[in-house]
Image (cartoon, helix red, strand yellow):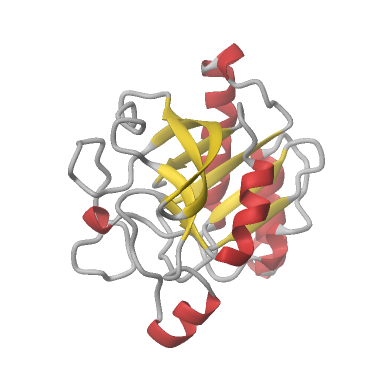
Amino acid sequence: MTDSLSRRQILRVAAGAALGGIASPLLAALPAGDPKALSGLIARANAALDRHGARVTVRDRFAVADFSAPSWLPRFHLVDRASGRVTPLLVAHGRGSDPAHSGWVRRLSNEPGSLASSAGAYLAGDAYVGKHGRSRRLIGLDPTNNNAEARAIVVHAAWYVGPGMVRDHGKLGRSEGCFAFSDTDLALVMDQLAPGTLLYADRA
């Protein structure tokens, strides 16, 4: 029976296991990737909600950045805990995480000046308008990302993120460690990552 499961069924099973048995209708639409890795990261995000307790005031949803996947796949996932719905989006990683610009995260770092993406749980902070336009501050909650504010690791839009970049270059451009999205997706991310929402990023 296991051998005959379709990829769609495997994705649903993985999502259901990670979300307490709730199947996800949108996970079935994900492109090639590793559903086991994503389900593991969703489980870690749920654990982070408990670990950071009252600091995370938004409890019905969170976001997961799966840096096990390459930049040409939608690897940033908005997770609705109540319905089990998972919405995948493209997101860039830091140039310090991928010096050769392969599209894959090779290292994660919390060091100032590393220009790398960092692993761990983040708390969404205030929105502001900066050099990248509308953006959202992020607060690193773990020892692996507690320099996020000092490093100005934020959510913002960037010209080098979007389906057109994947089509023309086979991968996204790189940030300086920020979570960079397409102009088209930014409004959704800013809305779903309201202040007090958890964002969990790591590799499986």
Q: Residue 76 at x, y = what percent?
A: 54, 54
Q: Residue furthest top?
A: 54
Residue 8 sits in quarter: bottom right
Q: Nearer the viewer, residue 40 or 161?
A: 161
Q: Please report the residue visible at 27 percent of the width from the left and 71 percent of the height from the top.
A: 102
Q: Residue 51 at x, y = what percent?
A: 52, 17
Q: Please report the residue visible at 26 percent of the width from the left and 36 percent of the height from the top.
A: 110
Q: Is residue 5 visible?
A: no
Residue 68 in the figure: left or right of residue 187 = left
Residue 114 in the figure: left or right of residue 53 = left
Q: Residue 70 at x, y = what percent?
A: 40, 65
Q: Is residue 121 visible?
A: yes
Q: Is residue 123 above or below residue 169?
A: above
Count of labels in the image: 0
Q: Nearer the viewer, residue 45 or 122?
A: 122
Q: Residue furthest right?
A: 83
Q: Is residue 144 above or below residue 162?
A: above
Q: Please report the residue visible at 36 percent of the width from the left and 31 percent of the height from the top.
A: 149
Q: Residue 42 at x, y = what percent?
A: 57, 40
